[in-house]
Amino acid sequence: MNRKKTEEIIFKTLMNISVFLITGSLLLIIFSIFYRGLGSLSWEMISQTPKGGFYFGKEGGILNAIIGSLYLSFGATLLAMVVGIPIALYINVYLVKHKSFVNAIRFFMDLLWGVPSIVYGAFGFTLMVMFGMKASLLAGIITVSIFILPIMVRGLDEVLKTVPKGLMEASLSLGSTKSETAFRVFLRQTIPGLTTAILLSFGRAIGDAASVLFTTGYTDYIPTSLSQPTATLPLAIFFQLGSPIEEVRNRAYASALILTVIILIISIVSRLVSSRYNKQRIKF
């Protein structure tokens, strides 16, 4: 057996082991969540708010955390889309000839992507103090949108980089402006990638606890305005799992299960949407 064949076998074995470990770890996490969560889940758990306090109250459920998480994640993702999509299009349409500047922007976004979420939480808290804001749903949305903005921009940017240059040249030669080319041609070409970027951003928004720890607060009630504090599923897990009362800990396990199911549903829907719109792309 020659050297190249031996190297191939070694690296193939290492890759198989890596896949096995990652897949096994994922299945173990999912199994433990469903094993502990299913036993704690009930209609009362998902249809009622906590009674007697989220930490000591034995009765009620986690409806406040479910609604709060959806409010927060949808609001933050929408705000990040409004800001992030134009940034990604601007980089790939208007700045296509300024490679050094574009690379600097991408490097800056990569740095922001790697910043721990607790730093964004501290930054959001600083903004709250500066502008005299209280812990609220609005403060959480702003903080989380800043946190997921680099994910949104870089996710879409990587897809836009795959759009053939000839497509832009063809659009411009037909009399289209760069704005029309960006929003009517490039954006349509990247709908599957945009869906994936939204998924990644939504998953980080709904599953992160550190960035909202100082900004959204926590409450047993469902918020009725942006100025009120709100509960989220990650914070429900964080606070309630440390309670000495078993019924309260059960709400934490139910929160973990529901959070996992929500992300799973969003993943499946995004795959279906991506498959549908991928057929409409112009292929070369």
Image: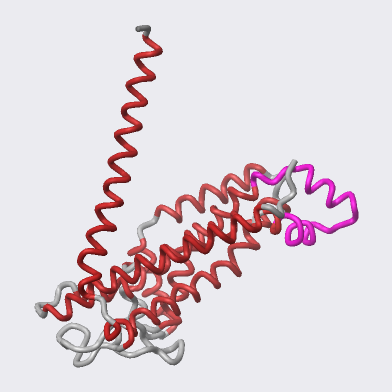
Pick whichever, 91 or 240, lies toward us: 240
Q: Nearer the viewer, residue 6 or 186?
A: 6
Q: Is residue 178 left or right of residue 193?
A: right
Please give the name of the residue rendered at 22% of the width and 85% of the height, measured from the top-left corner: 54
Is residue 187 positioned above or below 223 on the image? above
Residue at point 42%, 82% (across, down): 137
Residue 178 is inside the magenta segment: yes
The location of residue 159, given as percent across then percent down, is 61, 49
Determine the residue located farthest toward the left in the rendered image.
244
Taking the view exactly as shown, the residue that stands out farthest to the top is 2
Q: Residue at x 76, y 56 (%)?
A: 185
Quarter occupied by residue 220: bottom left
Residue 87 position (above or below residue 240):
above
**Relative image position of residue 203 (x, y in whole percent):** 43, 63
Looking at the rendering, in which quadrant would you find the C terminus? Answer: top right
Q: Looking at the magenta stretch, what is its main secondary structure? A: helix
In the picture shown, does residue 5 fall above or below 153? above
Magenta stretch: give its range: 161-186
Please identify the quarter of the rendering in which residue 33 is found: bottom left
Magenta highlight on residue 129: no
Query: In which quadrant of the rendered view does residue 241 lie?
Result: bottom left
Q: How is the image coloured?
A: secondary structure
Q: Looking at the picture, how far across and down is residue 279, in whole percent?
A: 68, 52
Reply above or below: 46 against 161.
Answer: below
Q: Residue at x 36, y 79 (%)?
A: 66
Q: How many marks?
A: 0
Q: Nearer the viewer, residue 163 or 249?
A: 249
Q: Quadrant of the N terminus?
A: top left
Residue 156 picture location, percent across and down: 59, 55
Q: State left or right for residue 259 relative to residue 200.
A: left
Q: Give the left or right position of residue 220, taking residue 92 as reference.
A: left
